[in-house]
Amino acid sequence: MQSGIAASAELISQFNTLLSSPSQFGLVVSIAKEQLTPLHLLTSSSPSASFSSNVSSLLTPHIKPNEALYLILRRHATTPALVAVTYVPDAAPVRQKMLFAATRLTLVRELGSEHFRETIFATTAAELSPAGFEKHDAHVAQDAPLTEEERTLGEVKRAEQEAGSGTGTREIHLSKSLAMPVAEDAIAGLKALANGGEALVMLKINPDTEVVELVPSSAQPRSIPELVSAISATEPRFTFFRFEHEHGGVESAPVLFFYTCPTTPGTKSIKYRMMYPLMKRAVLEVASKEAGLEIEKKFEVEETDEITERSVLEDLHPKVEKKAAFSRPKRPGR
């Protein structure tokens, strides 16, 4: 993550208090002045109080429908005893959503990942109620056996899909004053393409949050016509495709980039045409610097039907014209 946020000395101190005192139930944490800062240290009223009762009496009063928070809760009797919760409600400001999502791993890393048994991503207050935690436990039990990393990734993706808010993003800085948010699963998809695990990655811009997101797709095109059928004919797309083909008896698999922007009527189209050219630079920078992709050719068209196998092959393998040798004209009278 590249949010530049670090844990404050006050947070580290209160976190150590939480670790050393079983009577402490949890910490409510926010971001202030580019630091992870504690808001409340939650102290249990009784050593015998259950997790559910502590949630109801201590945690619930701090959960608001429009404010993102980090929650560190004592949940287990054995080590690691803590869970880290990232709470990013739908009604929170977009900038706050992106900042909290981008810093969630920093929180765990700076406080020591060995202290946390799991991480949870929540978007509603109901998920942080006693019933919500029970539902989470049941879901985790059904998903077993998954690794902690796999479970965490699945929770983040489910939360992003349910919230539709573009969380789990990284800001790619194009200049000192301009940064573009790109979803983490989009970056992961590009890395999988670079490593040979994927042949097709399509990205889009969420018009509400302006986050570059991965387009879910089960398509596995093996030719340019199959690729064209997989790309939306009504909305703009950034498409990366590993084109395995043979030309002149030589097999190759170059990575191609296609920027398509269909001419659709309405104000939405105007906004798209403003956003996509600007975001294209960020997307290509992520592909190159973050994912290590080497793009052989870039194509920019309006309609998808402008992409043909013939035009792609002509760009990849241009014909070399043989120039005729210059013949000096004969002098008259000879």
Image (cartoon, rainbow, N blue to C red):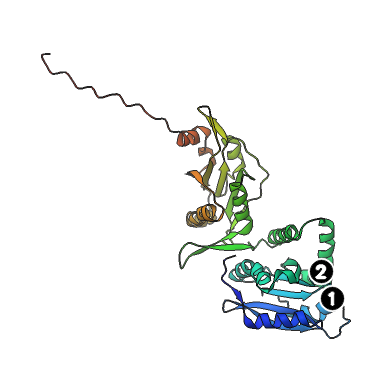
Q: Residue 299 at what x, y percent from top left? A: 48, 43
In terms of secondary structure, where does tag 1 sit?
helix
- Tell me what residue is drawn at x 74 percent, y 83 percent: 17
Labels 1 and 2: the sequence-earlier one: 1
Mark 2 nearby-residue class (10 Å; few <14, some 14–19, many ≥20)? some
Q: Is residue 65 visible?
A: no
Kind of residue at disc 1: Phe
The N terminus is located in which quarter?
Answer: bottom right
Q: Residue at x 50, y 38 (%)?
A: 306
Disc 1 from disc 2: Cα separation: 10 Å
- Residue occupying the far bottom of the picture: 45
In front of the other: 248 or 180: 248
Q: Report if the CB atoms under discs 1 and 2 are less than 8 Å apart.
A: yes
The residue positioned farthest toward the right in the image shown? 48
**Residue under circle 1?**
51
Give amino acid for label 2: Phe
Give the residue number, with chain letter if any, for mark 2.
133
| Residue 220 sits in quarter | top right
Q: Is residue 140 visible?
A: yes
